[in-house]
């Protein structure tokens, strides 16, 4: 109980990363006036930033850029080396693609260039509490992007499923006999094929539908078929 109270009363550690020294120092002075926020470090973008952030026991990382590949690489490096640190971008342009890139990189806060000092402080507090912060106009952008990606993934899954079960007429005919419980010899005689050809067809179908045996292949085909006219009345044995 005592540890929980101490945790609630302890300030949130903030590390500031910005290329402009004057901006970093101004932000540090601003945040140090808040008792619930503690500036534990500041610096520019460099390969040593992640080490400094980790050693400072940072809770929130405040960054001013997501323009170059170097910026993105730094964020990816930070996400891997100090995954517990939450990232907040500030001074950003009102650009939907940049915002979505930031979301995909795991950023928890996204503030535009016109954000006020009070809005920045409030955003840091919200992110520290586990919230995600972004301009209201980007909510629709995020919903649309998620819906679009879900639709694309569904389309890809459908294409893969269609390709998986694109069997030839001969394969369908053969597998329907397999489902009826016929042996390779009986199927060969029924279709006027050699047993080797029957075995080869069955093996190829099993590989195509990713089945462990002939009966599992029949079951998967029945599930994956869009039409079942070739399988009506057939029971897999």
Image (cartoon, rainbow, N blue to C red):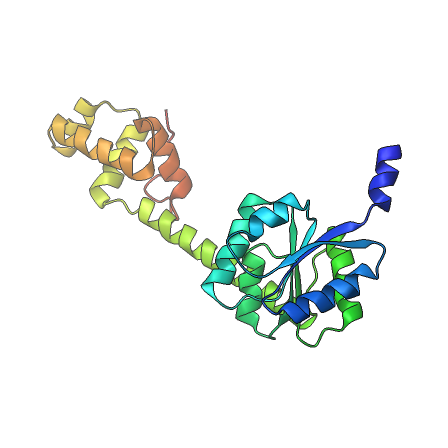
206 to 13, vertically: above or below:
above
Is residue 188 visible to the viewer in this orientation of the structure? yes
Quarter of the image where the N terminus is located: top right
Q: Give the left or right position of residue 56, taking residue 122 as reference.
A: left
Residue 198 place in picture, x, y as percent? 17, 30
Residue 86 place in picture, x, y as percent? 66, 52
Q: In the image, what residue occupies the spot 58% across and 61% down?
A: 44
25 or 8: nearer the viewer:
25
210 to 110, vertically: above or below:
above
Q: In the image, what residue occupies the spot 58% across and 54% down?
A: 106
Q: In the image, what residue occupies the spot 48% across and 56% down?
A: 73
Q: In the image, what residue occupies the spot 13% across and 27% down?
A: 196
Is residue 232 visible to the viewer in this orientation of the structure? no
Q: Give the left or right position of residue 198, taking residue 227 as reference.
A: left
Residue 159 place in picture, x, y as percent? 37, 53
Quarter of the rendering containing residue 144: bottom right
Quarter of the rendering containing residue 185: top left
73 or 224: nearer the viewer:
73
Quarter of the image where the C terminus is located: top left
């Amino acid at each position: 109980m005592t540890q929980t109270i101490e945790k609630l009363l302890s300030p949130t550690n903030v590390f500031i990363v910005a290329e402009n020294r004057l901006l970093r120092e101004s932000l540090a002075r601003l945040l140090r006036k808040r008792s619930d926020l503690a500036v534990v470090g500041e610096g520019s973008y460099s390969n040593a930033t992640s080490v400094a952030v980790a050693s400072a026991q940072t809770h929130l990382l405040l960054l001013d850029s997501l323009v170059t590949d170097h910026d993105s690489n730094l964020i990816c490096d930070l996400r891997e080396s100090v995954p517990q640190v939450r990232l907040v971008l500030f001074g950003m342009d009102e650009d939907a693609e940049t915002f979505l890139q930031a979301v995909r990189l795991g950023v928890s806060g996204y503030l535009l260039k016109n954000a006020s000092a009070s809005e920045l402080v409030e955003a840091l507090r919200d992110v520290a509490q586990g919230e995600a912060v972004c301009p209201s106009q980007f909510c629709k952008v995020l919903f649309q992007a998620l819906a679009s990606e879900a639709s694309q993934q569904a389309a890809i899954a459908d294409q893969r499923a269609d390709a998986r079960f694109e069997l030839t007429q001969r394969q369908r005919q053969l597998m329907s006999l397999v489902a009826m419980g016929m042996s390779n010899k009986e199927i060969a005689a029924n279709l006027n094929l050699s047993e080797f050809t029957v075995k080869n067809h069955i093996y190829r179908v099993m590989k195509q539908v990713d089945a462990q045996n002939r009966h599992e292949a029949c079951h998967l085909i029945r599930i994956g078929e869009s039409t079942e006219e070739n399988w009506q009345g057939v029971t897999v044995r």
